[in-house]
Image (spheres, rainbow, N blue to C red):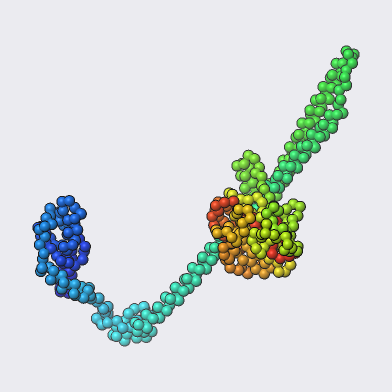
Amino acid sequence: MASLKQASKLRKDMTCPVCIEILRDPVTTDCGHNFCLQCINQVGKTAENPQCPLCKLPMNKNAFRPNKLLASIAENIQAMDPAEFQPEEKEPRCQKHKEKFHYFCEEDGEFLCVVCRDSRDHKTHEVTSIHEAAQNYKVQIETQVQHLGQKDNEIIKEKKEGEGAIQVFRAQVHLERLKILEEFKRVRQRLGIKDMLGRSTYLHRSKEFEFHNPIPFPPNLEKKMNEAKARHESIIESLKKLTDNLNTEGKEDKSTFLNSLDKKDKENWLLLQKNNSELPTSVPMTLDSTSADPNLTFSQDLKKASLYDVDSTLNTQAKPRQFYPFHCVRGSPGLSSGRVVWEVEINGPRGRVGIVGVVAALPQGTQIQNSESCCLWALSVSSSDCQAMTNCSSRGTLPISLRKVGVYVDYDRGDIVFYDAITNKHIYTFQTSFDRQVFPFFGLKTARSSITLSP
């Protein structure tokens, strides 16, 4: 042990303070310190008034003296095996019997020497060699690692499903909010109609009280003036009662509407009324027939698009299909901020195929397939399954049969969520970032199929 310490100390003494390596071409300075020639010369070059790196005394670089003894010792040290400078590890031994450990007691979890194995304490226990025990525990550890890996994958999957469910719930809440706003607009319109009817009744009744041109100085002028005044006051009183009745009916209609909500929805509605002095206007989604494939036909309210028979002569070079082989149409209005949700029902024969999604604004006449960047995020829906896809790649097939698809877009977050609008189950979520306006996007591939929008 003493020789090991001495060897370590010698190696330390032969180390250059600058490069922390064994001295090479060692030289001694005026102050008595030793350095590699190259290291100390480098110090002298970088300083105008060089100093010793150890004691900071002035140093004359022309007075460096080669140290041949140190050079010889340094060569011998470099020729030595590095293991000679490392302390030998002590082999663990039994503290009681001072023997090496060769066995392992499975029951007590202890290492045993030969004497311990045959002792009364372990004689009846299951004992194996250390090597065999190590192999057994290695297998157990690897099994546990695989099991934990599976659990980790399950947790990640459940987390994604949970996040998808939250996004679907957010979409449903947003959709229900739009429905409530539309319903309340109808209530206000109904109240407005009642108000107009009341005014019409007032006008009609006012015709009954016509004032004829009086004759000069009629004898009963004062009497007639009093009667006219009384009738006028009667009209004012009737009008006041009518106004009160309209206000009462309006309150009753509003009360009926609020009573139809549960506690949570009522709280949300009252909070909305408090925060918004004006009722926000929701814009329903429609199909933009000007952007449509010529083979598509539309309902009068632009909520339904149908593909009856495919006429190849209609698809001229002047207007090629935007996303072949689908016959496509954009939705309106587009989205540049905020959130929007819509649902679309796909009908048709058993082998029907449709596409639902979001497309970024492109120059007129540009085909989606020719776009260099990702500009389409969609779900291809057939009678038996669906497939998440972009214009750049497909994301795999999902064994889900869909008839009504919900789409929720949060422009600011870059979320595009697809869900089953019948079961409210999450299907797929794209996470991206938008740099331009985006539009709802629909397409049909199979003849005698159709799509219907709501709301």
Q: Is residue 159 left or right of residue 181?
A: left
Residue 254 image point, x, y percent: 71, 43
Q: Residue at x 81, y 34 (%)?
A: 200
Residue 256 image point, x, y percent: 72, 46
The reply to whether residue 171 is visible in this rendering is no
In the orientation shown, which residue stands out farthest toward the front? Answer: 317
Q: Is residue 321 left or right of residue 373?
A: right
The reply to whether residue 184 is visible in this rendering is yes
Q: Residue at x 19, y 61 (%)?
A: 39
Q: Nearer the viewer, residue 135 or 13?
A: 13
Quadrant of the snapshot with the N terminus: bottom left
Please say if 222 is above or below 425.
Answer: above
Residue 164 image point, x, y percent: 57, 60
Q: Is residue 434 left or right of residue 348?
A: left
Q: Is residue 129 left or right of residue 35?
A: right
Quarter of the image where one finds residue 298: bottom right
Q: Nearer the viewer, residue 367 or 8?
A: 367
Quarter of the image where one finds residue 354: bottom right
Please say if 377 is above or below 154.
Answer: above
Q: Residue at x 29, y 85 (%)?
A: 114
How many marks can you see? 0
Q: Residue at x 19, y 67 (%)?
A: 22
Residue 119 image point, x, y percent: 31, 85
Q: Nearer the viewer, residue 99 or 444?
A: 444
Please say if 96 is above or below 386.
Answer: below
Please say if 354 is above or below 440.
Answer: below
Quarter of the image where one finds residue 158: bottom right
